[in-house]
Image (spheres, rainbow, N blue to C red):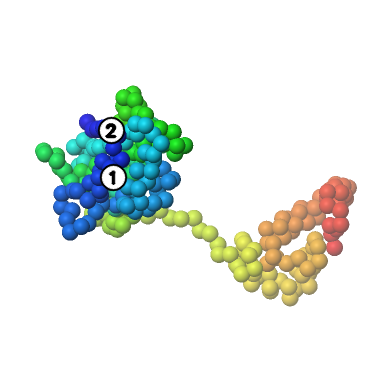
Amino acid sequence: MFFVEARYHRSPDRAAGQVRYIAHREEGLTDGRRRELYGIGERYRALRGDEPAIRQALREDARGLRNPAYFRFIMTVDNPTAERFKRLDGPQSERVMRDVIDKTFRGALRGTQGVFAIHHHGGVGRPAHPHVHALLSPRFENRMAVHISPVRIQRIKERWEREVLAGLQRQERRLDRMRQALVPRLPLSRGRDDRLPLQVLPFRPARPRDGQLQLFPRTTKAVRLLHDIDWARQWLRFGWRGTRWERNPEKAARRVMFRLASKVMPRGIRDALWLLRGLRGIGLRQR
């Protein structure tokens, strides 16, 4: 199960020492190196991990308070979750934890401010796992004194567990998508009898340079020859002036069929049909 420990004290000097502890004291952290300090709230985030400035800000927040309360949280994960974190590298793990801490305190204790650091060492009988040491300021962002009840601490613990699992799941899905994109898709080796039939795509004629879809590409040469015959040229020139088969062959074919069909009709029906055609499109006359 997830573990959240919350303790408080009322000493500004002790709070400054705790900032130094969570930044420097960790197994495997030597030669004066320190953990990155992250801020909770706009004021402490603006300090950008400046350790002396953070210690001074915590002391200043205690001024004017009779009994300032500095709450320190140690927030860990269980062993199955620690095993899942092994899939992530250091920067990815810290990115998840930073997002989780921000959502946890913003959702369960809105307005709080302070500082936290992310540790990665293990414990007695525990594998190495990411966990958080957080130290809260004795004042909220609106300058009111901090008081956290046991009920609110329980809400923080529940929110912490929920946000860790959700953030870890999002990161795992992102890693899986990246790995699937990087792995080349090799063709399946099948026998001669197990070969899948190739799917033949429908033929799509190429679009000419002028943008007009050419439905009858083989008629271009024939139409060019018909222009040399007088009676054929008369049949091809109908509708508006300058109509060419190459520009709109489908419409040209419809007009030819209509003209041929009207020729075999009785004169009265043909005149009535052409009259109705003229009413539908005024200005389109047979020439």
Residue at image location 28% in from the left, 33% down from the top: 8
Give residue 210's position: percent from left, percent from top: 64, 68
- Name above or below for residue 61 compared with residue 245: above
Q: Given the image, on which type of amino acid does mark 1 rest?
A: Ala
Give residue 166's position: percent from left, percent from top: 34, 38
Give residue 79's position: percent from left, percent from top: 18, 37
Tell me the residue that label 1 is attached to: 16
Q: Earlier in the sequence, mark 2 or mark 1?
A: 2
Residue 56 visible to the viewer: yes
Q: Left or right of 132: which side holds 287?
A: right
Give residue 31's position: percent from left, percent from top: 17, 59
**Outermost residue toward the bottom?**
228
**Outermost residue toward the left?**
125
- Please give the label number shown on residue 8: 2
Q: Given the image, on which type of amino acid does mark 2 rest?
A: Tyr
Q: Secondary structure at mark 1?
A: helix
Q: Residues within 10 Å of mark 1 (few under 14, many from 20)?
A: some
Q: Left or right of 228: which side holds 146?
A: left
Q: Residues within 10 Å of mark 2 (few under 14, many from 20)?
A: some
**Mark in the foreground, 2 or 1:** 1
- Please give the label number shown on residue 200: none
Residue at image location 81% in from the left, 55% down from the top: 263
Measure the alpha-carbon separation of dots 2 and 1.
Answer: 14 Å
Q: Left or right of 282: which side holds 209?
A: left
- Name above or below for residue 237 compared with residue 280: below
Residue at image location 33% in from the left, 33% down from the top: 69
Viewer-proximal residue, 32 or 132? 32
Image quarter where the C terminus lies is bottom right
Image quarter where the N terminus lies is top left
Residue 110 visible to the viewer: no
Residue at image location 16% in from the left, 43% down from the top: 122
